[in-house]
């Protein structure tokens, strides 16, 4: 019975976090994703030149590189590497899934362990907003 109380508290905390995350997304300004993106052309290494703050890269100070590798029809392996303020390498690995199969421009990313993948607030929206005709740069 002693373990039931911490588990119940954890469940309440996770539910509250999920609800607050949903409210935050609903209040965000509307972004417009591309009508169509060729997701296969995004596979490979991309060098970040600018970004808005995000939780996955909070310790990154410079030299951010993201590598995308197709795993299945709807799943993509994501590896981010960067240097922190002390110059040390930071590495995070996650997965992306395609949310909109027709446009392939709306994805969700998760960097938490697979055992927690069922929690909706661990998935972050990632939309492709612009891409060069030759896929030499993108804005997401």
Image (cartoon, rainbow, N blue to C red):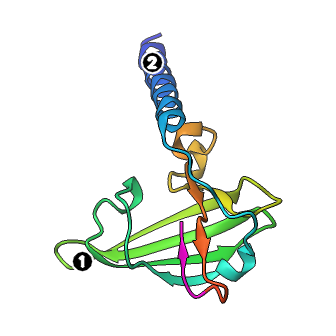
Extreme residue toward the left, this view: 86
Q: Is the magenta stretch mostly helix, strand or loop?
A: loop
Q: How crowded is mark 1: few (under 14 residues within 10 Å), some or many (20 or more)?
A: few
Asked if residue 105 lies in the magenta stretch, the reply is: no
Extreme residue toward the top, this view: 1
Q: How crowded is mark 2: few (under 14 residues within 10 Å), some or many (20 or more)?
A: few
Helix, strand or loop at label 2? It is loop
Q: Name the residue under label 1.
A: 88
Residue sitting at x 38%, y 53%: 55
Tell me: residue 15, above or below residue 24.
Answer: above
Query: Where is residue 110 shown, x and y percent of the image?
Result: 55, 54
Tell me: residue 128, above or below residue 40.
Answer: above
Part of the protein shown in magenta = 136-140
Helix, strand or loop at label 1? It is loop
Tell me: residue 107, above or below residue 17.
Answer: below
Q: Mark 2 points at which residue?
A: 3
User: N-terminal of the two: label 2 or label 1?
Assistant: 2
Quarter residue 116 falls in: top right
Q: In the rendered view of the protein, which quadrant contains the C terminus?
A: bottom right
Query: Where is residue 54 shown, x and y percent of the image?
Result: 38, 56
Query: Where is residue 40 shown, x and y percent of the image?
Result: 74, 78
State the separation of the CA atoms marked 2 and 1.
39 Å
Residue sitting at x 70%, y 82%: 41
Q: Residue 104 shows which numbered tag?
A: none
């Amino acid at each position: 019975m002693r373990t039931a109380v911490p588990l119940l508290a954890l469940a309440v905390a996770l539910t509250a976090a999920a609800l607050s995350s949903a409210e935050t997304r609903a209040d965000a300004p509307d972004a417009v994703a591309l009508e169509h993106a060729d997701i296969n052309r995004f596979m490979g290494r991309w060098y970040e030149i600018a970004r808005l703050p995000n939780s996955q890269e909070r310790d990154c100070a410079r030299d951010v590189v993201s590598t995308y590798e197709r795993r299945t029809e709807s799943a993509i392996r994501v590896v981010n590497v960067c240097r922190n303020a002390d110059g040390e390498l930071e590495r995070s690995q996650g997965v992306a899934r395609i949310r909109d199969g027709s446009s392939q421009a709306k994805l969700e990313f998760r960097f938490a362990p697979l055992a927690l993948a069922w929690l909706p607030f661990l998935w972050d929206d990632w939309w492709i907003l612009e891409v060069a005709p030759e896929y030499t740069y993108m804005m997401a």
